[in-house]
Amino acid sequence: MEVGRPWSFVCEMQFLLREVFDYDYVEIAGILGKSEASCRQMIHRAKERVAKRHRRFEPSREETDRIAASFLQAARTGDVQTLMSLFAEDAVMMSDGGGKVRAALNPVRGPDSIARFIVGVVRKGACNEKLSVRIVAGPRP
């Protein structure tokens, strides 16, 4: 979970245990070896950070299509520089193979590392299916 600056592992675990798994504060404190008061405060701060999260900009459908096309073309041709230009300096990529294909075990951080990872995956033929754009989150036009 990357919201603003990276969270500590303990902060992230507290937030997830409370908000995703619905543990109560006493249980979280016991699991993590923290006081209940400390857990309450940390989770409160985490909720505030999530609530303040906002998009840096709201791209138009045309801009989204242009960026996606640029990404796909760069991935297909191995153009690391173009891929890098599409990512923020603090970009973090998470991958999940769903138990069916290999994936990065750890987050891939930074434009250079992310671009090289993507080019490597495409070059190795890990994208056996046709690369295409799919809207998986966000408003539909």
Image (tube, grey):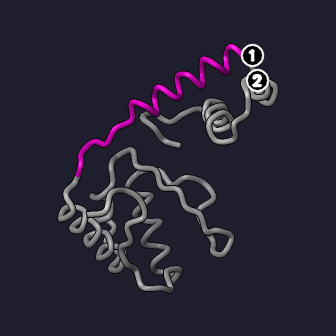
What amino acid type should be assigned to the residue bearing mark 2? Ala
Quadrant holding the C terminus? bottom left
Q: Give percent across and percent down for residue 86.
A: 29, 58
Residue drawn at the location 78% of the way across and 22% of the way down: 26
Q: Earlier in the sequence, mark 1 or mark 2?
A: 2
Q: Is residue 32 above or below residue 95?
A: above
Residue 81 visible within the image: no
Which kind of residue does numbered mark 1 sit on? Ser
Residue in the image at 68% along x and 13% along y: 37
Q: Is residue 130 visible?
A: yes
Question: Which residue is located at x 51 percent, y 28 percent?
Answer: 47
Q: Secondary structure at mark 2?
A: helix
Q: Position of residue 122 (x, y in %)?
A: 45, 78
Q: Quadrant of residue 130?
A: bottom left
- Circle 2 packing at 10 Å, graded few (<14), some (14-19), many (20+), is some
In the picture, residue 27 is in which quadrant? top right
Q: Which residues fall within the magenta stretch?
A: 35-58
Asked whether 38 falls inside the magenta stretch, the response is yes
User: Could you say which disc has been placed on residue 29 in the image?
Assistant: 2
Q: Which residue is more in the foreground, 107 or 38?
A: 38
Front one among 69 and 17: 17
Mark 1 lies on residue: 35
Work out whether residue 30 or residue 95 is closer to the camera in this orientation and state it: 30
Can you give x and y, in whole percent of width and height, for residue 101 in the image? 63, 75
